[in-house]
């Protein structure tokens, strides 16, 4: 069953560090079954607090999503993301 990693960016606190994160996270995608679905496009907030950005990546399974998230390559990138911005990161199981 498909799974989605959803990253909700609430605010950027250090744009330069966010660039470091983006570069550090790139190698974690290599060889992984990731399909980008949403990548920081325009947002129309209908309810709740507006977000600065949203990223959604599709994986074949929750296990694939967790394997990517827990990989040494992505774990090395996480401190840069946490230093650069306030995010909420979730894995949601799909319906297919």
Image (cartoon, rainbow, N blue to C red):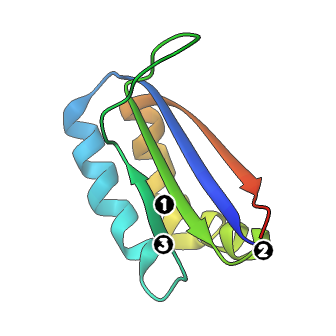
Q: Residue furthest bottom?
A: 31
Q: Quadrant of residue 50?
A: top left
Q: Residue at x 53, y 83 (%)?
A: 32
Q: Residue at x 58, y 66 (%)?
A: 58
Distance between the alpha carbons at the discs numbered 1 and 2: 19 Å
Pointer 1 and pointer 2: residues touching (CB < 8 Å)?
no
Residue 72 lies, with reference to residue 89, above or below; the image says below
Label 3 vs label 2, nearer the camera: 3
> Seen in the image, is 62 located left or right of residue 50?
right
Distance between the alpha carbons at the discs numbered 1 and 3: 21 Å
Identify the secondary structure beneath mark 2.
helix
Q: Which residue is mark 1?
A: 76
Q: Residues within 10 Å of mark 1 (few under 14, many from 20)?
A: some
Identify the secondary structure beneath mark 3.
strand
Q: Which residue is mark 3?
A: 35
Asked whether 75 or 66 is in front, the reply is 66
Q: Earlier in the sequence, mark 3 or mark 2?
A: 3
Q: Position of residue 43 (x, y in %)?
A: 37, 29
Q: Earlier in the sequence, mark 1 or mark 3?
A: 3
Q: Which mark is residue 85?
A: none
């Amino acid at each position: 069953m498909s799974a989605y990693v959803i990253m909700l960016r609430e605010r950027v606190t250090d744009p330069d560090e966010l660039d470091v994160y983006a570069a550090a996270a790139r190698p974690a995608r290599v060889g992984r079954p990731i399909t980008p679905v949403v990548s920081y496009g325009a947002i129309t907030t209908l309810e709740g607090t507006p977000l600065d950005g949203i990223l959604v990546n599709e994986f074949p399974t929750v296990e694939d999503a967790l394997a990517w998230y827990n990989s040494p390559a992505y774990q090395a990138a996480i401190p840069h993301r946490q230093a650069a911005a306030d995010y909420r990161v979730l894995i949601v199981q799909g319906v297919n």
